[in-house]
Amino acid sequence: MCGIVGYIGREESAPFLLEGLEKLEYRGYDSAGVAVYGPDGLRVAKAKGRLKVLAEKIDGGRAIPGTVGIGHTRWATHGAPSDVNSHPQTSAGGKFAVVHNGIIENYLYLKNHLIRRGVEFVSETDTEVVAQLLEYYYDGNVMEAIRKVVEKVEGSYALGILCEDFPDRLFAVRKDSPLIVGLGRGENYIASDIPAILSKTRDICRLKDNEIAVLTRSNVGFFDIDGYFLEKPVEYIEWDVESAEKGGYEHFMMKEICEQPKAVHDTISPRIRDGRIVLDDIALTKEDLERFRKIFVVACGTAYYVGVVAKYAIESMVGIPVEADVASEFRYRSPVIGPDTLVLIISQSGETADTLAALREAKHAGCRVLSIVNVVGSSIANESDDVLYTWAGPEISVASTKAYSTQLALVYLLAIHFAELLGKKSPEECAALLAAVEKLPEQIESLLAHKENIQFFASRYFNAGDIYFIGRNIDYAASLEASLKLKEISYIHSEAYAAGELKHGPISLIEEGTLVVALATHTGLFDKMMSNIREVKARGAVVLGITTEDKLEALTAQADMVFPIPSTETCFLPSLSIIPMQLFAYYVASMKGCDIDKPRNLAKSVTVE
Ligand code: G6P
């Protein structure tokens, strides 16, 4: 999400900031800006759109001279892409300029607090709160102001800070969002990502949570939050620019798979306060919900498969009938919808042509439209009645992974929220469900720690001609996404079947050595799945089983290899079972030498019909 670069040295800073930001373009962004300290004091230039719009505005950097500066590419989270919402954000008195990656979770509370004390805000961003707070606490000591801000803000942040009173200093601090300091000769740098500064230096120090860096031209001081000096090791970066862009991973897909614990955490944690769900961003009331006789979930591709999980989750927790439909079908089939229908639109990009058209059909029929979207200010977000954003950051690999996981997480929060509003679950039950959602990031992390088991299995079967995925209930829903992941990047023919349908057709395709992936995580349906596994084994299938740890032994007796996942509430199991499946698709495609991040014939965002 977003990109930061900062410079302090003897050369003009703005041209270098533009160059560094260009190296971060691969991350995706919607606007950019720089702040430079020069002969005329602190000057800021920002522009919505591509970097070249900013570069033209400041004549390649020549229009804002100065040898100290910070720059930023923004991926909108709070407030649509616009000049004013771009970073750097400044404090009202102009003392501080700030660039920020991450999310300030309690920004609304802090903003209201400052507004009551007469501070005037100009943007919708959470970042402006940091700039304003710095000035609010500042009494001549920047370190002290930073310390107080860090105490107040909740969430994740990497911050680059300039203070008007200290033209020879650049400050940086972080928590849960990466920030590095680059060491040069007579110049030093900060960056969110290594590629931004790789043309200048390969010597870096990584800031840890709550560490503050103070950069001058000749020196960098590192301090803990209490102001004590820290010795930090210097790391020499051997990567080339391309692998640096991928954070050292071979492909964006693997990078994004590994980002899922953080992406899910970032998406859910701002929406949970004191053990309760707070969906400030949507205006749906209990009365609205009571009016809905049906919920349609409409989307394309991976987002549609989130919709299939949503059907099981919402129906079982809330008791309202749910229909999941692909947008290209929904829009042309005269669905029975009206003011008593809630249409839940799911889209990573917010621009998918069929999904947008389906949304317009729904609006035209008088439905209430709630969307789950990753791109702030996108068409789907703009045209929906209510929007919930997944804070996954830009997803670059065509095969969607972290978007899927964050969309699922929001579906769970919605289901619990609806169940609570309608009194379908007791407060205790809701609290237990919520606790299970909060645990998902660490559970996903624990699964990622055992990648090599899946890699081993993939190494034995990557030459398979056909692969079948079977499951029941939420395992069937997850199978659909598992099969899509595999086919889109490995080009292996694969299909997902509801396991109960096996004997109505697909079992005729099973022969000696056919690979079947059996998702058997649903405890209540485990025995049924065991019967299905026996059926395919009896016909010669090789079975990879996915189940919860408590069922590991039972499944191992039947399957050729079993990958266990931690237990969670039944409806949330797809968030865990999909992880080995994403890894399986990735390793199979990698062993086949496929172009993993850009599979043939596919596009990341399908904006035409
Ligand atoms: C394309 C992408 C998929 C994505 C689908 C829907 O097919 O390759 O990864 O799931 O579009 O995109 P959306 O942006 O609406 O989620």
Image (cartoon, rainbow, N blue to C red):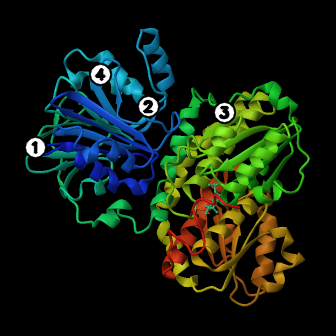
Instruction: Tell me the number on the disc at residue 84.
Output: 2
Give the label on residue 472, or none: none
Q: Quadrant of residue 341?
A: top right
Q: Earlier in the sequence, mark 3 or mark 1?
A: 1
Q: What is the secondary structure assignment of the residue under circle 1?
A: loop
Residue under the image location 50 percent in, 39 percent down = 81
- Mark 3 vs mark 1, foreground winner is 1
* Marks 3,1: beta carbons within 8 A: no
Identity of the residue drawn at 74% across and 49% down:
310
| Residue kind at label 4, given as amino acid type | Gly
Q: Position of residue 108 (x, y in %)?
A: 51, 23
The residue labelled by disc 3 is 431
| Disc 4 and disc 2 in contact, CB within 8 angstroms | no
Determine contact: label 4, label 3, CB under 8 Å: no
| Type of the residue with mark 2 | Val
- Secondary structure of the residue carrying tag 2 is loop
* Disc 2 CB within 8 Å of nearest ligand 1 atom: no
Residue type at mark 3: give it: Ala
Question: Going by the image, does 289 lie left or right of 28?
Answer: right
Element type where label 3 sits in the image: helix
Bin the neighbour count of mark 4 within 10 Å (Cα to Cα): few under 14, some 14-19, many 20 and up: some
Q: Position of residue 495 (x, y in %)?
A: 73, 74
Decide: is 195 above or below 289: below
Tell me which numbered mark, 4 or 3, is placed earlier along the sequence: 4
Q: Secondary structure at mark 4?
A: loop
Q: Say whether residue 305 is left or right of residue 588.
A: right
Could one spot residue 410 in this view of the protein?
no
Q: Which mark is residue 10?
A: 1
Q: What crowding class fits label 1: few (fewer than 14 Cα within 10 Å), some (14-19), or many (20 or more)?
A: few
Give the residue at mark 4: 94
Q: Quadrant of residue 214?
A: top left
Most distant residue in the top direction: 117
